[in-house]
Amino acid sequence: MARISKSELIRLQKKFKTDARIGEEFGITRQAVHQLRKKYGIESRTAGNPERNKEMVVLRESGHSVEAIAKKFKLSIPQTYRILKETASTMKPAKKRATKKR
């Protein structure tokens, strides 16, 4: 695995935005960059972008395709699906359980 310090990884994350792009610069995989982030306790950029994620859910609910949303936010389609699923589940209020009458 590439020797990247915590401070350098934070700087690279601000510059290149994605794990995949950082990996390209160092000749390592996106997964290797992800493992480094986990090792150093650095959050992903998507976790720190709730406004964008909520906007993505609103666009999807208004009928936009996942492909169009991915293109608009410069994300991969699988990543877009994941963000939509995770964000939508946190935005919806919890359903009340029906109580049985005896």
Image: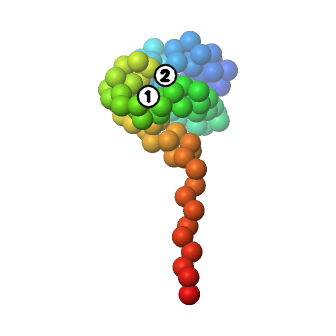
Mark 2 belongs to which amino acid? Answer: Thr
Left or right: 2, with 8 as reference point:
left
Left or right: 42, with 17 as reference point:
right
Residue most toward the right? 7
Label annotation for residue 23: none
x, y percent for residue 42: 63, 31
Left or right: 31, with 7 as reference point:
left
Secondary element at tag 1: helix
Is residue 77 among the parts visible in the rendering?
Answer: no
Mark 1 belongs to which amino acid? Answer: Leu
x, y percent for residue 96: 57, 62
Identify the residue position indicated by label 2 in the image.
18
Label annotation for residue 59: 1
x, y percent for residue 100: 54, 79
Q: As rendered, which of 65 and 13 lies closer to the eye?
A: 65
Q: Residue at the location (54% across, 70% down)?
A: 98
Q: As rendered, which of 19 and 81 lies closer to the eye?
A: 81
